[in-house]
Amino acid sequence: MAQIAGNFIFNEIEKDIASGKYTADEIKTRFPPEPNGYMHIGHAKAICINFSVKEKYNAKTNLRYDDTNPEKESSVFTEAIQRDIAWLGFKWDELLYSSDYFGRMYEYALELIKKGLAFVDDQDQDTIKATRGTLNEPGVESPFRNRSIEENLELFVAMKEGKYSPGDRVLRLKIDMKSPNMNMRDPVIYRIVNATHHNTGDDWCIYPMYDYAHPIEDAIEKITHSLCSLEFEDHRPLYNWVLENLDDFKEKHPRQIEFARLNLTRTITSKRYIKQLVEAGIVDGWDDPRLVTLGGLRRRGVTPAAIRKFMENIGVAKSNSTIDMQQFEYFIREDLLLSSVRVMGVVEPLKLTIENYPEGQKEYLDVPYRMDDEASETRKVPFSRNLYIERSDFEEIAPKKYYRLYPGNEVRLMGAYFVKCTGFVKDENGVITEVKCTYDPLTKSGSGFSERKVKGTIHWVDANENVPVELHLLYDLLKEGGNSKNFLDNINRDSLIVKNGYAEISVKGTAPGERYQFVRNGYFCADTKYTEGDKLVFNRTADLKSGWKPEK
């Protein structure tokens, strides 16, 4: 992977190496997702940042699951996370779990109690929250804050042994209820949870909080740089406090560095909101191709290379900002332009009959994969009297500067012949069902004919030898300008439009996940959920137009 542009993290690592804080061969990062949902494009940024350190310094990067909340976590999510990271092209050094360290975390909690730095609090969650104070007012110390060390040890052991119910007691650090940093106001570090853990089963009924567990895990694994998003900046003093007050880590411990999260316009990344969409049946799962979950992007046909190139381009910043989705789509198109096979596919078919082409005759034309490249490879495409063209490529009454088919006008059929419209047929409802034309056999593509020119070229598919395809045209899930307090009222109910069209015969046998550029219609990927056998379902990955261009 190329170095991420504007990566200030590299500069900080270089400073730490130069100062002697760490040697180059000690550099180590980790990616620590909570396995309580599926990863999205924002997680991809964190993944790329951590693994870019691994690649630049020939360092190590662990995958460690932050599984300290058994009520929300599942092995289904751990497996999905591993699949997504591997799909992006990264390989972790060790696969670990926060729960691997539950025993050591418990021992460290006992150490803090013995040092008079932690106490068991009998107050309930609401009371603790109410007495925490505000940004302008100090918190109120718990009436249980000055319990003896002996009593705190006895109560904490009893918590571990399951003698109390959830909410009865918690373990809190004893720091400073007057601290201007709310995170330092005697934070809770252990609570009682009666739930089966996906990794440790029923071994534990007390679970550490993230702010306590995370620095300990990093230190045990000898992580040098704990890279996390900007919302954890205010947690850094607590991160350092925990390690500085444990004998095993006070001399040398990891350094936390924060970076800006990835915020994209026109996207939904909130697990709560996506869950609503799934439960309401608006999307067909967490991998719906309209979502920016990594599973959804993969199913849509977005490539890992496009995601990584996008991350390299936006760089790593210290302050939050919002990136236009068009910028991401630009890199999707740039990658697909080089990696997709170009074929002809008709989204909204309209029958075209060439009246002077012999009935029963068929020929196979050598059509280039790239019409703009004389050296392009060709494929055999069937051509006969009856074809399908796009409905939008014919107008009964043509508007100004319309160069496609209309009565009396002549166009080129891509890779084939000139055809001239002679008429059309309508049904009883006035809908055009067929276009009639004649062709000039002397104008066959590649024949060297150049006596006259036409302004329009349209694509087509043979009506007798083709592949029926179901095409899913994907649009933004969020309405433009939607501001209802009810999230579901802001959803675009026309975000998925299904069309039944035809593709040229060369796509027959397409496997799930294969990508094509359907000329003039966009980039499409065979859906991995619904494509099976002769049933070909394509998701449109991106159209051909881009509203964003890179700065020169």
Image: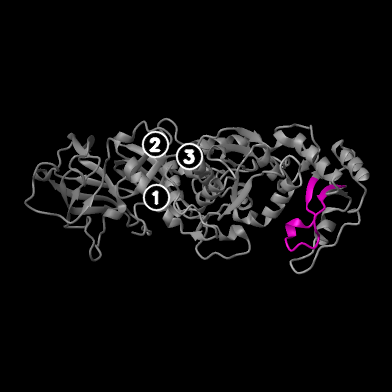
Q: Position of residue 494 (x, y in %)?
A: 48, 55
Residue drawn at 55 percent across, 47 percent down: 46
Quadrant (top left, top right, bottom left, bottom right) of the N terminus: top left
Q: Which residue is mark 2?
A: 514
Q: Position of residue 514 (x, y in %)?
A: 39, 36
Q: CA distance from mark 3 to mark 1?
A: 22 Å
- Residue density around tag 3, few if under 14, some if 14–19, many if 20 or more, within 10 Å: some
Q: Position of residue 44 (x, y in %)?
A: 52, 46
Residue drawn at 38 percent across, 44 percent down: 524
Q: How many marks?
A: 3
* Camera-side mark, 3 or 1: 3
Q: Which residue is mark 3?
A: 55
Q: CA distance from mark 3 to mark 2?
A: 29 Å
- Residue density around tag 2, few if under 14, some if 14–19, many if 20 or more, within 10 Å: some
Per the rendering, the mark at residue 511 is: none
- Amino acid type, mark 3: Glu
Q: CA distance from mark 1 to mark 2?
A: 19 Å
Indicate the secondary structure of the residue bearing disc 1: helix
Indicate the secondary structure of the residue bearing disc 2: loop
- Residue density around tag 1, few if under 14, some if 14–19, many if 20 or more, within 10 Å: many
Residue drawn at 70 percent across, 54 percent down: 237
In the image, is 274 to the left or to the right of 111? left
In the image, is 447 to the left or to the right of 547? left
Reply above or below: 248 against 480.
Answer: above
Question: What is the residue that sits farthest to the left in this orientation?
Answer: 451
Per the rendering, the mark at residue 331 is: 1
